[in-house]
Image: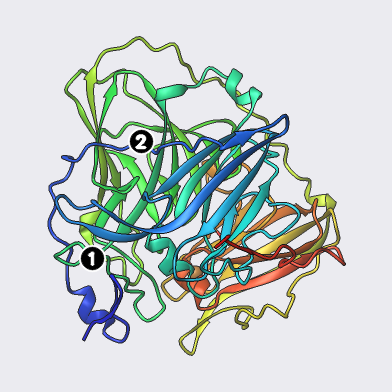
Amino acid sequence: GLMGSGALIFPLGFADAAFAQFSPQIDRFKLPFKRLPELKPLRSDATTDYYEIAMQKAKVEILPELHTDIWSYNGIIPGPTIRQQRDRLSVVRFINNLDIDTSIHLHGMASLPQYDGYASDLIPPGYYKDYHYPNNRASTLWYHDHAVHHTSRNVYMGLAGMYIVEDDVERDLPLPKGEYEVSLILQDKKFTKDGTLIFDDHREKGIYGDVSLVNGVPWPRMEVANRKYRFRVLNGGGSRTYQLSLSTGDDLIVIGSDAGLLSAPVRTKTLRIGMAERYGFIIDFSKYPVGTKVILKNNILLSNLDTDDRTTEIMCFEVTRQETDDSSIPDKLRLVQPIPISSAVKTRTFRFDRGGGQWYINGKTWEPKRVDADPGLNDVEIWNFVNPGGGWIHPVHVHLVDLQMLDRNGMPPLSYERGWKDVFVVGENQTVRVIAQYGPHKGKYMMHCHNIVHEDHDMMTQFEVGKGGDSPLSAPAKPLPA
Ligand code: C2O
Ligand code: CU
């Protein structure tokens, strides 16, 4: 009863039967950890670096000795990392060599003039588009597909990569750098016995895998020195919320949230990371003797379909050598100046709900002709995100702006949520209150649940900042020369 579609299996209509099928067994902590390769610009001038990324099919080895067909950026999963300096501009030419329509979203930064991965701003097969990014804030971002109604499939198939913006303030801090600064993209996927990816969204409810991947490698083992490392972690999966901890019971020392450094480091035993959230943290391996294995664990958060216990462990760090450590964790990182509540000129409420087999925001599904909020340019507003329950966590993502969380059900945010953010975990029976200044660009931007299956069907809306902004479709894709 499986419907094949090229190399990808879509068991639609037979979802539950297909879920009973498990991926091939893989030994944990045997495969070597993989660092994400960084993309070099094709050329640079005084202000700008020019990059090129091709979307293409590729065959890669994810499970040992099996080949998996993916849809990739530049042939690799995850895609190449772009590392950029604050206030230098990037122009990234995305070339669509796939046979599906794609859309590119740099998650967490406004692109200029506006076409910010708007879901119907598509690049057809055989076309390309240049995306302009201002890089106006040091932060950990990611780029991923955003094609309307197909984001979950396209991201699951491989269309996601990291994008890091650095600045001098951050570079001057004594934090671990260079080879001691490591990105971790967490994803979960499911495979047939021969290595083919199974895309099963459980009748538009959520997609879960039973193979836990870090940077595209199942349960990797990373060799580390007995010193501090800085990690940038991204939940790049479809529907799984992680709750990370260390097998030693030691602290993760959180230094950054989605959109930049926290004011001060925060120690925590567990770090919850919803879909599309990013956190920066330090692990200090200095107290572990050579030979110690430290497992990065995931405590399962119950949700309707998240029932697999194979994803309770993520990766293993093995201390294999001694080294001196010249890094340290300063008491102050970068001040996150709270946006005063008194500056808000309006409060709006968005209810993330399900009914009649549909996902809604305020009872409505995605409609590109409709605008559901219209903050004035540079206005400060307070938005309430309400999840009335029903078994789901909704990680709510607002495009274009950096926001701050005020509270969750009237209680203060978690210690590590008190920074600049663009995704907010809204659990069952929770109301999360956020504040932001809407600007600096006029125009239409999206907001949606980042359980990307919910986003696709159709827990997505848009707001318009100011009046008379550019159309989100203002820069059409161009055909590739024949
Ligand atoms: Cu990361 Cu609108 O998405
Ligand atoms: Cu959702």
Give how far across and how far down residue 423 sits, in percent.
57, 55
Ligand 1 quadrant assignment: bottom right
Q: Position of residue 183 (x, y in %)?
A: 42, 37
Regarding residue 403, the answer to whether it shows in the image is no
* Above or below for 114 versus 322: below
Residue 136 lies, in percent from the top left, at 70, 39
Task: Determine which quarter of the picture holds residue 137.
Answer: top right
The residue lying at 18 percent from left, 63 percent from top is 23
Disc 2 under 8 Å from ligand 1? The reply is: no
Q: Nearer the viewer, residue 356 or 141?
A: 141
Q: Which residue carries the number 2 mark?
A: 35
* Towards the viewer: 456 or 146: 146
Which residue is rendered at x = 38% and y = 22% of the image? 228
Q: Amino acid at mark 2?
A: Arg
What residue appears at the point 60 percent right and 18 percent down from the top-left corner? 172
Q: Secondary structure at mark 1?
A: loop
Mark seen at residue 247: none
